[in-house]
Every structure is written in structure tokens, then in C-alpha cells.
Amino acid sequence: MPESQDSSNMAPDLSRLESEITGVVGLPGSPIFHEATQVFCPPARHRRPQAVIRPAGTDDLAAILRRAATDGYRVTVRSGGHSFDGFPIREDAVLLDLSGLNEARLDSDRRLHAGPGARILDLAKDLDASGCAVPTGDCPTVGLGGLVSGGGFGYATRKLGLTTDNLMEAVVVTGSGEIHRVSRSRSPDLFWMCQGGAGTAAIMTEIVLRTFPVERVTAAEITMNWEYAREVIVLYDAVMRSAPLDLDLKLKFRTTGPDRFMDMASEGPQDAVPGEPLVHIDGQYLGNRQQAEALLSPLLDHPAVVGLSLREESYFEAMTDLIPLSLLVDPAPETIRPTRVTCDFVAAAIGQGEADALVRFVEEIQYAPEMHGGGLLIEPCDGVVGQIASDQTAYPHRDQRMVIEWELFHPLVCTSEQISRMDECLSSARSQLSHAISGGRYVNYADRLDTPSNWWLGNKDRLETLAGRFDPQGVIVSRLRPGPDVR
């Protein structure tokens, strides 16, 4: 029987399913239910799915989806629980928690076999011991399933590609409960969906990725003076336009001060001036320090520099040094400020006009009294990413240079006025950049203002058709699924 039953929760009758699987069912009030609903997005932690199911493996998952189709309930899926908007936590569906499917191994060809619940930090550590790496994102608690399903940016994207570009094969379960082993030559339509289709009609239970031999890298962290923000933006863009693919840098702005820093327990790091935006450039070079220093010299010689760290270290050490582990080793950090995240792709060069618009956005979220702070991040998405045709994978954003990530902090519960104010802030920034941004948006940074056309561009119709074929009853429900019934 389920661990406990909360009569206020309208959960479907899962008693027959329990006899068909070896996994665990948790109803509201049970420890499993509580654990599975502790996700990165703070507002989503207050939503209550109908129930939680933790499948023990592929056969379990297939049985769950077949039973859902027969009994008429819908399911959502989480692997790491890092959706910025908490999309998997819905009150009209059963949550499938794949965090337990986290085993990982290297085969004799040094390909990584991992479950969707494997976390990025754990994988990076294990691979580092074997002298290899997979290009992944840089948030350590992200689950591999969600990362691969959406794309996967990181500090080696320009040289090694998106995480999803390194998918060799996968075991998937469709929404109708069928099990397939897929690759580019076997069930190519399903494989195409796995590479950026956001898991909207099929769920990966085994992910096979190409690895790369990586030993020492040079990690870079540069702190800049806010006074030079406009110059820094233009200079950063120029450096990245001429940089070899081995260099991957991100430009970050974050608000500080009371009620404006991302960690609610702090006003900012030690080197911050509370109430003044932080300006950081960080990243890594797949080479030695001397080479990195030469490539970075236009930035390092600028008077804006107030802090610098260049370190030769392992790929794993660089990853852990470049992320705020104090916040992110916990998949549901207690002091993380509720954050709305969205993005825009940029194909053109970023000049003075674009820099002015970006600085105005940061000034607004830092200084406008009705705003609550936030950040702005610019990272490259060019290099080998653009060597793949836009229709070869479900992920379509192949001809872009940069992605701009907009971050807006907000109260746990927002009023309609506060939501409208955030919408206005985003719309204003986008309007000022309308000649530079493409209209495409990254599905792993999905926002309430986005549509499937933003995420999938010219691939939307094919994805919608395939979703209807592999999940005709809509058992897997997702805000991300293209089609007329997007909820």
C-alpha cells in the first residue's frame, strides 16, 4: 500500500499499479512525496502533485505509463528537479521522480552510460578519475535526463558541443508505454526527439554519451568594476568573436545588497559593494595558463579589472570552482531567492547600443524600488554547435553566437502587479534589442511568456506530429509540449 494517504489530495487509485511495479508510490504526506517535491524552484515546492511514483527501472516506467493510459491519469517527469519554473510539479498529474535512476558507468569504448537521475556533479567527478569528461551544464544538481532532453550548455560547449549533441544512443519509453533502444540509425524519429525535444512524449531511462579525454584546463575568474560595464560588454564580445574554440567564457551581472542578492542570507560576496551590481567573467580554456593569459590579455589589461584568478587544474576542479556550491549542492537550497529565468539568442555582434540596453536592464533590477533584484548572464553558443543543421536535432538554435539569460528575483507569492512589472521589464529590454535577438529561446530556460514556436522554431510542427504518434493519449503532460493543448 502507499506509505500514507492525505484525503485532501485527489490522487488516482494506484493500488493496481503497485502490484505491477517494484518501484515505490508515495501519496501526499509521505516522506517520498515530500522529498520528490523539494525542487530548485521555491514556488513550485508549494504545489502538490496528485502522487509521486519512483520507478525502479525501464520496465517499471513502461508499466506506469501503460497503466496511466488505461486508468486515465496523466504524469509529469523530473530527473534533477532543476526546472527554473518548476514545470514538472503540477496539481493535475502524478509526478514521476527519476532521481533514483542514477547509475553510471564507462564501457570499453569509453562511452558513458547513465540514468536520467544522475547529477552533473557526480558524473563529472567519476569521469575525472578516468581522465575524461562530457560537456555538460555548470549547475551540479541538474539531472542528466533534463539536460540532454533540452540541449545542455556549459564551459566547453564551443569546442565539444551541447550535451545532447554527444548523445550516441538511448533507451526510451514512449508515452504509450513502448520500450525502444534508439540511435541515429535505429528509430531515428525517437532519437531526434531525444536531442532537444524536452521529453514531451518519450522518457529516456538510459543515456549513452560520447566522452572526451581531458586532463588539465585553465580556469579563469575576472572581477570587473561596475563603472566600466558598457565597455566590458563590448570588449567581452570582441574577445569571444576572435577566440579559439578552446576558450569558453561567460559574462555575469548580479545584483547585491539587502533583498537583492541571490542568497537571501547574504547581501553579496566579500568582494561586493552592497547595492552595486557585481560584474564577473569566468570560464575555462582547454590548455595551459600561459596560453590562456595571452588570449585573455585584452580583458586583463583593461582598467576595469579589480580581481583575477587563473588556475591550471582538472576539468572537475574547474567546474566546482566556477559555480556557487554553497547554494547548488542542495537541489532545493533553502536560501535561494525565487528566480524567474528566461533567455534570448543573439546572432549578431554586441555593440555599444546593445551594451546600453543590457546595462539599463541591470540598473533597473538593481535600483528600481519595486523590483527585487536579479541578474544577467551572457554565454557563447557558437563553435561546433553551429556545424549541425538546425533540423538534424529537435534543438534548432544552430546559427546563434550568444545566449542572454535574464534573471528576475521575486517574492515567493507574486501579485498580478508584480508579475506584470517583471513582464514589462523583460519586454522593454527585448524591445531595445529587437534588431539583435533572433526570437528563439532555450527550452531549459522556459518562461511563462514563451511559446513552443520560440523553443522549437522550424522544428515545432515535426515535434508536434511525433509527440502525437508516440504519446497519442497525452499521458505525459508538459507545458513544453507543442500543440493546441499546451498547459
Image (cartoon, helix red, strand yellow):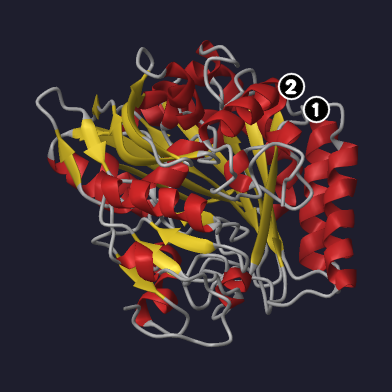
Check disc 2 and report its element: helix, strand or loop.
loop
Question: Residue visible at 13% across and 30% down?
Answer: 107
Label 1, residues with CA under 10 Å away: few <14, some 14-19, many ≥20: some
Q: Nearer the viewer, residue 179 or 210?
A: 179
Q: Residues within 10 Å of mark 2 (few under 14, many from 20)?
A: few
Specify the quadrant of the image occupied by residue 459.
Answer: top right
Disc number for residue 207: none
Q: Secondary structure at mark 1?
A: loop
Q: Which residue is mark 2?
A: 348
Of the residues under marks 2 and 1, which one precedes in the sequence?
2
Residue 409 lies, with reference to residue 233, above or below; the image says below
Q: Residue at x 86, y 26 (%)?
A: 435
Q: Position of residue 53 (x, y in %)?
A: 39, 64
Residue 206 horizontal side relative to residue 97, left or right:
left
* Horizontal and vertical percent position of residue 352: 81, 32
169 in relation to 93, above or below: above
Question: Relative to 430, does residue 307 appear above or below in the rendering?
Answer: below
Q: Closer to the camera, 223 or 338?
A: 338
Q: Is residue 161 visible?
A: no
Residue 263 in the image: above or below residue 347: below
Residue 363 percent location from the top left of the image: 80, 58
Q: What amino acid does circle 2 point to?
A: Ala
Q: Is residue 415 visible?
A: yes
Asked if disc 2 and disc 1 are in contact, CB closer than 8 Å, the reply is: yes
Q: Which residue is rendered at x = 90% and y = 47% of the image?
A: 428
In which image quadrant can residue 88 be found? bottom right
Is residue 37 toward the left or the right of residue 455 in the image? left
Residue 349 image point, x, y percent: 72, 23
Q: Which residue is mark 1?
A: 436
Q: Quadrant of the N terminus?
A: bottom left
